Image (spheres, rainbow, N blue to C red):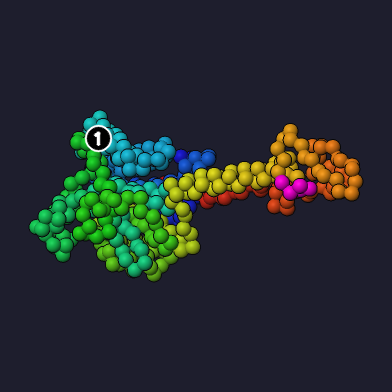
Amino acid sequence: MISVESAHYPVFASSDPGASGKNNEDNYAVSSYILSDSDPTPSMLAVVADGVGGHQAGEVASSIAVEMISQLIAESDASHPLATLEGAFHRANQAIYSQATINPTNAGMSTTAACVWIIGNQLYMASMGDSRIYLKRDERFYQLSIDHTWVQEAIESGLLTREQVRSHPNAHLIRRYLGSKQPSIPDFRVNFSPDEGSRNAAANQGMVLEPGDYLLLATDGLTDLVSDDEIQSTIGRYSQEDALEHLTKLANSRGGHDNITIVGIQVPDDKLLIAAPKRRKRFILMLVILFIVLLTLLGVWMYQMYFWDESNGGAVLPGSTVGISAPTNTDTVISPTLPLPTSEFTPGHSPTPPPSDVPSEDTQVPATYTPWPTSTTGP
């Protein structure tokens, strides 16, 4: 992919250390691209990571995750999004674990990661840990990602209810993260319903974003202190930039015990991009249709110029002759001759003009150009 300056969807991001005075161990990045010189389909990537570890090791882990994932996505051609995301998570996991074993001050460091990759208007995502991905669509608010925590597993197994989770002592015990000795397994489920099932949730990858959709990525410094209903109402009430500021202030007013990082992506109401695969198919179809039309017009022009004799009302094959009978009251016979091209005059024979719907040789089809907006990379 080719890096560009502006995103094709408006995006705002913020990261706040919180009110507790702890070091900010969150990291995020937003990057924008087009697929290639020959394919201007826009693409954008947003990654949020929440590091864990003492002596600023958490900040190191989250930084490695964001940089590694962003780099490997940028080097891809976007032809296999899920395989590329999986490879990027694996490489980030290996890099973090390697740094933790080499440098004693980074021992045990790890990080969560939540990632959305939009190609055209198709959404792909992956996550590990408890940093979340939300989607606001119309009046509904969905937590698309699934927390990888002890309490989430307890909910799924029926040991806890959702009302018991927030105050549970194991609420922040993460079960899946980057920096593990074991191979990382990113979660590819796109969850529209708690009861949707893993297979159906995974099938939602590549879903088409609709006008008015709003994507939000956030670390648990926000979601621990601000409910999903409050996040939804804030997004609906404020502008994109003001919404992120308001949510950060709300979390800090309730203690701000952790870092607060938020990325918001708005799909404009009046902009619906064609999904990348459909765009390529339509472009190829248009080229085929244009070629057929031009070939047909060329054939008609050549037929009328060289094979049609209006004086006899029929076609004349090359090399053939036409006999024309003289009036019956004379003995004169006109010798057979080949028909002259219609562009020249012969006595008693008017030239046949080319049909008006056939383009001349000077006709040029004007080129078209579709500008694509571009994006900025987050810090």
Where residue 103 sits, quadrant-wise, is top left
Where residue 94 sits, quadrant-wise, is top left
Residue at x 10%, y 58% (from the top left corner): 158
From the viewer's perspective, is 226 left or right of 7? left
| Residue 118 on image: x %, y % | 40, 50
Q: Main secondary structure of the magenta part?
A: loop
Q: Does the segment drawn in magenta span residue 189?
A: no
Question: Is the residue 262 above or below the residue 90 in the image?
Answer: below
Residue at x 49%, y 63% (from the top left corner): 270
From the viewer's perspective, is 71 left or right of 34? left
From the viewer's perspective, is 328 left or right of 226? right
| Residue 331 on image: x %, y % | 89, 43
From the viewer's perspective, is 27 left or right of 365? left
Residue at the disc numbered 1: 97
Q: Which residues are magenta?
A: 310-314
| Residue 272 on image: x %, y % | 46, 58
Q: Is residue 145 visible?
A: no
Viewer-nearest residue: 172 or 289: 289
- The residue at the far top in this view is 102
